[in-house]
Image (spheres, rainbow, N blue to C red):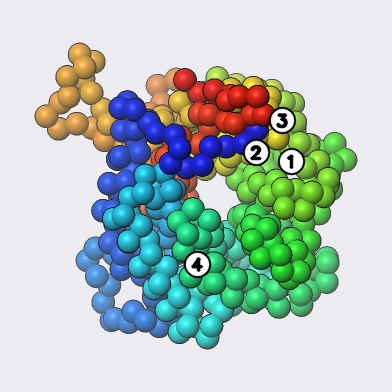
């Protein structure tokens, strides 16, 4: 099955289109300088002895080790909005951000364009605790590549390609065992980045990076049929398997597809899920078919929902099996729709004078009498803020698919 290009499917008025419009408004409400703040600081472009009053807080605070992650999500979402609608305002803002990232890269010496320092990777290589630096860096890579693939921004590809040279040299300085230790510190979707770059450039360095980022301690047990997921941080592993999916698509090497299928079987078929479609508690995989034992106020992390939906989409395209479309639909309505861009109404259906609103719920609480906790527009910036704007950039992704003999309708 083949996805229809963004822009070939249009949403009519309804809840899905309302979510996308709310999402667009949120994207445009965030100031360009604030989005770039941590990249500017790292490049020595922004200097002050006082922080501006409107600076982004939470995980985007300059004091947070995960700072700067949101910009990549923003660029990815903006690229999707433009691809789906041709929105010139969103495209113009995104193009300016890309040009400013090129400026940051130049100030950093021509390669590095991260919002955090290179030394964070040196720290994890010697076992010093740092909060997931490769997870953070992946987001900027992701945003750049989506701006190239979906919005046609050639400069974005040039930035990412030049930055990859730094990683090629750095990752080549370790033994296999040493680099396996590094890969145990959450890498986000770095494997998917190398696969995407290899698919675009064909460079042997990008192919070699894919091989180096093969996470033996996860992938080999999966292929052996072992349960390595129970009590493991879920959204560490899902992006790695998304990388395996792209690696199979760009290389045709069977082991990558075998990893994806083994992961789905272990994570979904043999584990089960809540009635909502979600599966995690406290961000970790529950034991197989023991969901009820872990009902609470920290179920169904939004990032895991979003990334598992992406994995389902890969498998749907490869196999045409409607079970993956059903999984997508269940999580769309009970995850993405339930956890983001919410606006309350009275039971009568009349909109109140001061409506309750919610931007993003990190978790979907499933225990009796529990309630959602909503993140703010500029003072939290959890990981789920990022997947929120990507998930709601367009809701046309998995509605229709092309087949050799017609069109598959997967959502109604």
Residue 293's x, y, as percent? 61, 24
Labels 2 and 3: the sequence-earlier one: 2
**Label annotation for residue 154:** 4
**Residue at 54 percent of width and 23 percent of height:** 409
Q: CA distance from mark 4 to mark 2?
A: 26 Å
Above/below status of 270 relative to 74: above
Q: Nearer the viewer, residue 190 or 293?
A: 190
Q: Nearer the viewer, residue 284 or 388?
A: 388
Q: Quadrant of the N terminus?
A: top right
Callouts 2 and 3 close, C-beta under 8 Å? no
The quarter of the picture where residue 158 lies is bottom right
Q: Secondary structure at mark 2?
A: helix
Q: Residues within 10 Å of mark 2 (few under 14, many from 20)?
A: some
The quarter of the picture where residue 166 lies is bottom right
Q: CA distance from mark 1 to mark 3?
A: 13 Å
Callouts 1 and 4 close, C-beta under 8 Å? no
Labels 4 and 2: the sequence-earlier one: 4
Q: Secondary structure at mark 4?
A: helix
Above/below status of 8 relative to 188: above
**Residue at 14 percent of width and 32 percent of height:** 354
Labels 1 and 3: the sequence-earlier one: 1
Residue named by callout 3: 319
Residue 237's x, y, as percent? 67, 47
Labels 4 and 3: the sequence-earlier one: 4
Q: Residues within 10 Å of mark 1 (few under 14, many from 20)?
A: many
Q: Secondary structure at mark 3?
A: helix
Q: Nearer the viewer, residue 61 or 252?
A: 252
């Amino acid at each position: 099955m083949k996805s229809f290009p963004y822009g070939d499917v249009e949403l009519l008025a309804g809840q899905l289109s309302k979510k996308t419009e709310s999402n667009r408004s949120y994207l445009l409400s965030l100031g360009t300088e604030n989005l770039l703040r941590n990249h500017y600081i790292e490049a020595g472009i922004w200097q002050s002895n006082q922080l501006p009053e409107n600076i982004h807080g939470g995980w985007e605070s300059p004091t947070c080790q995960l700072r700067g992650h949101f910009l990549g999500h923003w660029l990815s979402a903006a690229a999707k909005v433009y691809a789906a609608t041709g929105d010139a305002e969103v495209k113009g803002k995104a193009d300016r951000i890309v040009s400013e990232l090129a400026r940051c890269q130049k100030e950093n010496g021509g390669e590095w364009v991260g919002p955090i320092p290179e030394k964070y990777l040196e720290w994890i290589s010697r076992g010093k605790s740092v909060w997931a630096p490769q997870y953070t860096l992946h987001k900027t890579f992701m945003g750049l590549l989506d701006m190239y693939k979906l919005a046609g921004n050639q400069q974005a590809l040039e930035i990412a390609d030049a930055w990859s040279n730094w990683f090629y040299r750095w990752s080549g300085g370790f033994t296999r065992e040493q680099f396996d230790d590094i890969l145990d510190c959450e890498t986000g979707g770095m494997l998917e980045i190398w696969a995407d770059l290899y698919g675009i450039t064909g460079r042997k360095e990008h192919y070699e990076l894919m091989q180096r980022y093969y996470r033996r301690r996860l992938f080999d047990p999966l292929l052996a049929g072992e349960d390595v997921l129970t009590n493991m941080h879920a959204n560490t592993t899902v992006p790695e398997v998304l990388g395996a999916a792209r690696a199979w698509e760009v290389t045709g090497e069977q082991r990558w597809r075998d990893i994806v299928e083994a992961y789905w079987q272990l994570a979904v078929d043999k584990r089960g899920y809540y009635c909502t479609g979600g599966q995690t508690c406290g961000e970790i995989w529950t034991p197989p078919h023991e969901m009820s034992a872990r009902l609470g106020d920290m179920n169904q992390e939004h990032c895991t929902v979003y990334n598992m939906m992406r994995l389902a989409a890969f498998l749907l395209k490869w196999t045409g099996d409607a079970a993956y479309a059903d999984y997508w639909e269940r999580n769309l309505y009970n995850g993405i729709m339930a956890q983001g861009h919410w606006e309350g109404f009275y039971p009568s259906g009349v909109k109140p004078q001061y409506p309750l609103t919610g931007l993003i719920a990190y978790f979907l609480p499933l225990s009796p009498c529990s309630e959602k906790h909503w993140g703010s527009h500029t003072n939290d910036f959890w990981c789920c803020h990022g997947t929120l704007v990507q998930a709601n950039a367009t809701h046309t992704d998995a509605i229709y698919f092309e087949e050799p003999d017609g069109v598959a309708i997967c959502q109604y």
